[in-house]
Image (cartoon, rainbow, N blue to C red):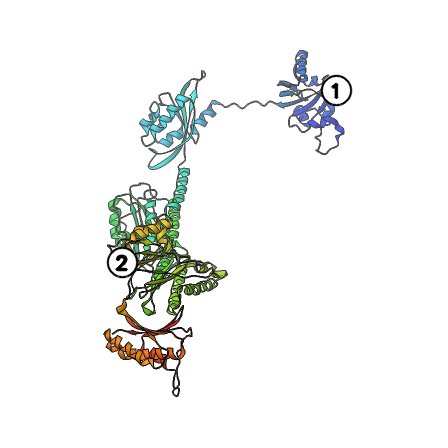
Amino acid sequence: MNAAREEPHAPTSAGPRALFDASSDAAAVVSGQGVVLGWTRAAEELLGHPASEIVGGSAARLLAMPGDPVRVAGVAERCRAGGGWSGLIPLRHRDGRRVEADLRVSASFRIGADECFLISARERRPQWTVGQSILDGFLTRSPVGMAVMDTRLRYVWLNDTLERFGGVPREQRLGRRLSELLPGLQAETIEGLMRKVLDTGVPVTDYEYLGWSWADPHRQHAYSTSFFPLVDHDNSITGVCYMVQDVTERWNARQLLALVSEAGTRIGTTLDVLRTAQELADFAVPRFADFVVVDLLEPVLSTEGHGAWLTDAGPAPAKPVMRRAGLSSVREGAPEAVARIGDRVDFVPPPHDAQLIVDGEPILMSVLDPSDELWVTEQPARADSMREFGLHSLISVPMRARNTALGLTTFLRSLNPVSFEPDDVLVAQELVARAALCVDNARRYTREHTAAVTLQRSLLPQALTGGTALEVASSYLPADPTGGVGGDWFDVIPLSGARVGLVIGDVVGHGITAAAAMGRLRTAVQTLADMEMPPDELLAHLDDLVLRLSEEHPDGEGAENSTAFLGATCLYAVYDPVTRRCTMARAGHPPPVVVAPDGQVSFPEPPAGPPLGLGGMAFEAGEIELAENSLFGLYTDGLVEAADGDMERGMARLGDLLARRDLDLGTLCSSAVRQLVPVPQPDDIALLLARTQALGAEHVVSWDVPADPAAVADVRARATRQVEAWGFEELAMTTELIVSELVTNAIRYADPPIRLRLLRDTRLTCEIADASSTAPRLRHARSMDEGGRGLFLVAQLAHRWGARYTADGKIIWAEQEIP
């Protein structure tokens, strides 16, 4: 074999010998007759012979020992059997020196007809021996503390490092136990671990613990300790050795990291500014400080205006106006506090001023001196507190978030003798930064929620009246602040003919957009109801309105706000106290509840129309008759789903609660809501109750009117006498004129049958019904016209007038205020 290493793609003319060139050990191929057939470069480096001197010659001349034919034959036989052989063999270098080599012989193989063996060798290097002085120096001056204890756990030996760690001289340790020397450590636990090692022989590694030592009695240190048994020549355990390292920095870093991580789950659990401030104070005591105060700027706690100072808004006032928002102490009752929760404060550590809150850096006062002139002059009460309770170290961190100054958080230590250090400032900053972001979120949310609630309440009816037809009561419960303001609404709308419209609805979504959408829908319902639309037509027009609102922000920047317009549910009912009939239609809303005078509860279901906003689907009206003194209730789904989400069960509970007859309507309404929803819910809740009344015959009178102009005088006279009989002499003349004009127009322009009706409730109403569907039109006649002044005259004399359509035609009505 050529001495040069062959490349992977070299020609194969060298034969099988090339297979051995890659070995890192010296290698040679020897025939069964002892002739060297191959020689590697590593072999040349080991023994100094180039391949040209060795290949083709006897391998025996490389041995530095007498020949042993019997041993060689035995090795060859073992290798022929498929095994290998290894051993320590002295070889002779080219320069004559002896080379001790670990020799390995492979199983035999053939190259052509020749039997061959692969022999590899590696020089055995002498092992380094450690002198006793070096070993003693290593043990004594190692940066790891070491000690040997006997089977009774008494010190036998210790190095300088352990002596320095504990602060107890070596001569005082020897022959004594750890628990006798360092009571500030976990001595009993450590000795228990050493006994376990003595009993089992199993080492204990990397046990970490905290403790105090005489070397540094004012600061707690963390140590990592390993214990292992000392074994004699007969495998008996003669003692235990332990090694200890001071890992205080690593321990503190890990603890602070865990502290900051835990703060993320413990601070800011609610969207409440004061609660968040208190959570910061409670979390930091006693983990980080002995006394913590959180002072927030007054605008932060206000729901009006901007709510804070912008950090780039220029110089701050010399004295910041703040309120104490959080307070916690290791002492019960926090006696070291000069101000309490809610008190006004202007505390900034001297010599700083309010500019610290706007753009200042955290303040570290490792040592507080209560006799310092600045403290005595500017903060005398706090100087006295420092002196009395031993407050000796302080960190003050400005609270800022999103370019907004929020307040100041101050950490103090008293019972903990260790002063704050620069690394502690970083931890305080991180805690305050997390809390500041939560406070700012809560502040922003509170302002928006307050604005939404104010808007919503302003859009809901301030007073409800059902006239003589209904006694009404309502209860509205806003959503839990964390759920956001919803879009529930209800209304009671007086209609012509002593009728009353009842409406309840629920807009999809939460927030100001939902409240605003609710206001727009409520206004639309009032307008449509005033146009005397029947319930099914009213919901159809309302559905068109919701569709238009949904298209106001089809995409782009306002798309997220369109969710408030994407849907709503609604139920609209009209009650007529004369006929005691209630006509209603619903759009995806739960059915009403009816409690009959005998206490029987039912849930009449008018045809269930789709929710508003889907479009393209018709609404149908249903009609029921209500006995006088029946209870009619409308509600939103949050009321019956609040307890367990089961609507049917919630409806049954609502019916049971409303069946009570011993409560007035207002008390019954509020009591039902309180019992069904005992705790805040994420959705708004509304309940509207109405107790029905009927207009008897003494309140209503009607006459058929012949289609003859001559009949006008008779009808007019009858109406005048009826009004006087009711005691409304003041209205006799105006009633006579109104009746005359309405009847004359009906006879002249409308189709029979024609009927006149007078109603007396909160107002005096005159109605003329005919079979025509032609809409009346108010005209402004010119001075020379002979007619066209009838409806204009009616409009001037009446409080209000209008027309509504019926299945048989239309009704024109006019109302007068009763003196």
Q: Are marks 2 and 1 in contact (CB under 8 Å)?
A: no
Considering the image in quadrants, where does the C terminus appear?
bottom left
On residue 114, which mark appears? 1
Rate crowding at label 1 as few (under 14), some (14 to 19) or many (20 or more) other CA atoms within 10 Å. few
Q: Quadrant of residue 636?
A: bottom left
- Badge 2 amino acid: Leu
Q: How many marks?
A: 2
| Amino acid residing under circle 1 | Asp
134 displayed left or right of 323 = right
Frontmost residue, 703 versus 27: 703
How far across and down, in percent of the image, does residue 26 sit? 66, 25
Measuring from the top left, give residue 140's x and y in whole percent: 42, 27
Position of residue 451 measured from the top left corner of the image (x, y, whole percent): 36, 60
Residue 31 seen in render: yes
At numbered mark 2, what does the secondary structure look like: helix, strand or loop?
Answer: helix
Q: Quadrant of residue 759?
A: bottom left
Residue 665 is tagged as 2
Horizontal placement of 467 versus 568: left or right?
left
Quadrant including the N terminus = top right
Asked whether the viewer can see residue 345, the reply is no
